[in-house]
């Protein structure tokens, strides 16, 4: 089996890291994996893993009116031509599109090849979803909230095309590590309790909310230190960083908070933490929560959307109401104040991820799906051939 993975992002976000790990896991199952992606960290990672890469221009279609829309439209056309060349060269049996924009590219040149659209988002235009649903062979939702959201857009999806295949991570890469060594690597205090947040700088990740609960924790225990890992990956929110820096100073956290920027891989940092807090209220999945749990770190997250399906409440951490900063602070403090219980939760969290969210399981379920799609394609092709033969015989009889 030969598949072509498509992504149109130039940077390595969570969706792209998931695709990279998935490519490696699919290769391990004997699938011939090729990729069409922009130059950058994702392409480099795929090449290092032995995945042949054909480069396409980076393109991002914005959800609303944006000054760069004309430029992005031109890039979309350029990416489409590059993808056409990639498909003709690779001749894949299945095209796997990692996100909305890659799926829009894929359906314009599929030539009867099944297109699998991997959906990792909860905020998509209904018109785009319906357009793609008529053209792709299957839609894979990475979590229960994503799959449910798709069925709400069109209830017939549930019976026809949507498949729930939970996202997975590389549990060999994200694993418990040396706490002191991790802290030295990032110049963090060796002995102080450390609470962290890891997310790219986009408003819905709620960094400001994290600073509010961090200030409450700091007021209760002045020895607690904080770390934020993340940056404005696509430079869409230049004012957000400045606003966060102002809030850090105003909250009295300047001497207690470290901001780690330009970090594509969280695996070296996570063992340094005592608690990971993830305040995002509309998270489609919560990959960073799986990464933290796999690293043996207890978590505190919002009950809503993806985290509510990822984190076993009271086992690997705590789920709280997304708007209650005091509850976030209380639960984080409880984990800090009860280190033995926190260690037990960390161990339980790693086992939970091993059982439910290992990328090998994701790859196995996708492999099964690919087999079914190819079998269905073969049946459809036989039916078309038989129908054509019947028409020819009927036309011959008429003559």
Image (cartoon, grey):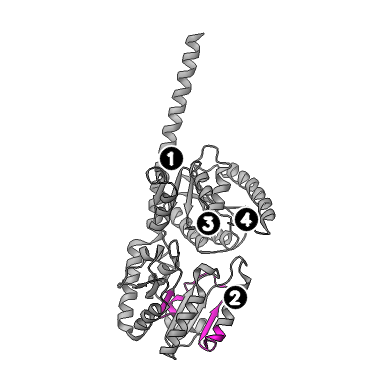
Tell me the distance, in whole angstroms, between the alpha carbons under discs 2 and 3: 37 Å
Residue 268 in magenta?
A: yes
The first of marks 4 and 1 along the sequence is 4
Alpha carbons under labels 2 and 1: distance apart: 47 Å
Circle 1 crowding by C-alpha within 10 Å: few under 14, some 14–19, many from 20: some
Read off the magenta span: 248-277
Identify the residue position indicated by label 2 in the image.
Answer: 241
* 192 vs 22, nearest the viewer: 192
The label nearer to you, 2 versus 3, is 2
Of mark 1 and mark 3, the one earlier in the sequence is 3
Residue 191 shows up from this direction: no
- When the figure is inspected, residue 29 is found, relative to residue 207, above or below; the finding is above
Distance (Cα) linking label 4 and label 1: 29 Å
Tag 2 and tag 1, C-beta contact below 8 Å = no
**C-alpha distance separating marks 3 and 4:** 24 Å
Along the polypeptide, which appears first: circle 3 or circle 4? 3
Whether tag 2 and tag 4 are in contact, CB under 8 A, the answer is no
- Which residue has dot 3 on it? 50
Residue 59: which numbered mark, if any? 4
Residue 207 lies, in percent from the top left, at 51, 74
Is residue 236 rendered to the left or right of residue 146?
right
Label 2 neighbour load within 10 Å: few <14, some 14-19, many 20+: some
Q: Is residue 379 above or below residue 218?
A: above
Secondary structure under the numbered disc 4 in the rendered image: loop
Give the number of the disc on residue 374.
1
Q: Residues within 10 Å of mark 4 (few under 14, many from 20)?
A: many
Query: Which residue shows up at 43% across the image and 62% down it?
Result: 285
187, above or below 116, in the image: below
- Real-space Cα separation, disc 1 to disc 3, in angstroms: 25 Å
Is residue 83 on the magenta stretch? Answer: no
């Amino acid at each position: 089996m030969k598949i072509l993975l498509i992504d149109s992002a130039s940077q390595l976000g969570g969706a792209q890291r998931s695709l990279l790990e998935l490519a490696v896991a699919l290769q391990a199952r004997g699938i011939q994996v090729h990729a069409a992606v922009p130059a950058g960290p994702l392409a480099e990672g795929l090449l290092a893993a032995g995945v042949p890469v054909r480069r396409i221009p980076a393109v991002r279609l914005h959800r609303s009116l944006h000054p760069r829309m004309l430029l992005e439209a031109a890039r979309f056309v350029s990416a489409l031509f590059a993808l056409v060349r990639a498909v003709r060269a690779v001749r894949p049996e299945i095209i796997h599109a990692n996100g909305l924009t890659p799926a829009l590219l894929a359906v314009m040149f599929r030539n009867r090849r099944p297109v699998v659209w991997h959906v990792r988002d909860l905020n998509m235009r209904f018109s785009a979803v319906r357009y793609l649903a008529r053209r792709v062979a299957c839609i894979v939702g990475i979590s229960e909230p994503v799959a449910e959201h798709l069925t709400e857009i069109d209830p017939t999806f549930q019976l026809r095309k949507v498949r729930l295949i939970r996202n997975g991570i590389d549990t060999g890469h994200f694993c418990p590590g040396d706490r002191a060594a991790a802290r030295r690597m990032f110049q963090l205090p060796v002995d102080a309790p450390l609470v962290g947040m890891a997310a790219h700088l986009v408003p819905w990740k709620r960094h400001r909310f994290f600073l509010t609960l961090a200030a409450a924790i700091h007021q209760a225990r002045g020895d607690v230190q904080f770390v934020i890992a993340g940056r404005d990956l696509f430079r869409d929110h230049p004012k957000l960083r400045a606003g966060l820096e102002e809030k850090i100073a105003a909250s009295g956290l300047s001497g207690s908070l470290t901001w780690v920027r330009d970090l594509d891989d969280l695996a070296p940092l996570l063992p340094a933490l005592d608690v990971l807090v993830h305040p995002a209220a509309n998270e489609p999945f919560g990959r960073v929560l799986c990464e933290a749990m796999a690293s043996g770190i207890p978590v505190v997250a919002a009950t809503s959307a993806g985290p509510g399906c990822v984190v076993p409440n009271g086992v690997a951490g705590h789920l709280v109401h997304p708007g209650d900063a005091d509850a976030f602070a209380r639960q984080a403090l409880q984990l800090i104040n009860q280190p033995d219980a926190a260690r037990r939760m960390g161990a339980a969290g790693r086992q939970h991820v091993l059982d439910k969210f290992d990328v090998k399981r994701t790859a196995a379920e996708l492999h099964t799906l690919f087999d079914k799609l190819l079998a269905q394609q073969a049946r459809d092709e036989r039916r078309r051939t038989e129908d054509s033969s019947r028409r020819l015989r009927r036309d011959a009889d008429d003559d």
